[in-house]
Image (cartoon, grey):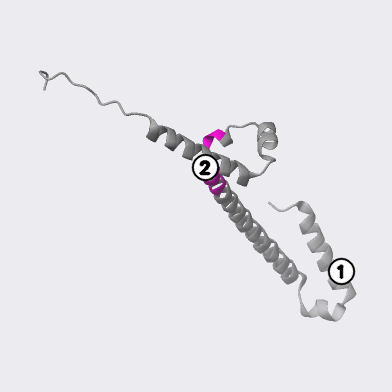
Amino acid sequence: MPPRGRKRRGKELVAAVATEAPDVASAVAPEYVEAVIEELEHESERRVKKLKRAMGDMRQEFLNHFQVELLKIPRKIREMKVEHFSSEYGGSMEAALKKAAQWEVEKAVLAAARPRAVAATPRGLF
């Protein structure tokens, strides 16, 4: 619902037009001017609602995209405290991601170097 001040200003505008320009006031009825102002108010309210809806949709889309991007960061870095992240990597996400890639390589090398245990089954069971 529009603020009450708008209607009063519209009526004041109609009164000002009627008193300041008598030749125009006789050509245009004050009721017509009020109707036009009322229609403009409704149109502006409709546009504001549409913009607010679009803003809400864009906000939600941004939050979803943000969540996806956060999930791309390795868990070890996501769970770090800000102070630790700043002191360790100087606040640089690029340095942190390089370190995370290095961790992954080290983990893969260790996994490859580890001897694999073969499950032994007794001969008579199968």
Could you tell me which secondary element the residue under label 2 belongs to? Answer: helix
Asked where in the image residue 84 lies, by quadrant, the reply is: top right
The verdict on residue 90 being magenta is: no
Q: Look at the picture and state if 110 lies above or below 38.
A: above
> Please, what is the three-letter code of the amino acid marked with disc 2?
Ala
Q: Is residue 87 left or right of residue 9?
A: left
Instruction: Locate residue 124, reporting x and y percent.
Output: 10, 18
Determine which of the numbered discs, if any, sits on residue 101 in the image: 2
Q: CA distance from mark 2 to mark 1?
A: 73 Å
Of the two numbered discs 2 and 1 on the same chain, state the one appearing first in sequence.
1
Q: Look at the picture and state if 126 lies above or below 33.
A: above
Asked where in the image residue 78 lies, by quadrant, the reply is: top right
Could you tell me which secondary element the residue under label 1 belongs to? Answer: helix
Q: Which residues are magenta?
A: 65-76
Of 44 and 94, which appears nearest the observer? 94
The residue beneath circle 1 is 16
> Please, what is the three-letter code of the amino acid marked with disc 1?
Ala
The verdict on residue 66 being magenta is: yes
Instruction: Locate residue 96, reporting x and y percent.
Output: 60, 41
Number of the front mark, 2 or 1: 2
- Which residue: 81% across, 68% down? 14
Of 67 and 45, which appears nearest the observer? 67
- Which residue: 82% across, 79% down? 24
Magenta part, dominant SS: helix
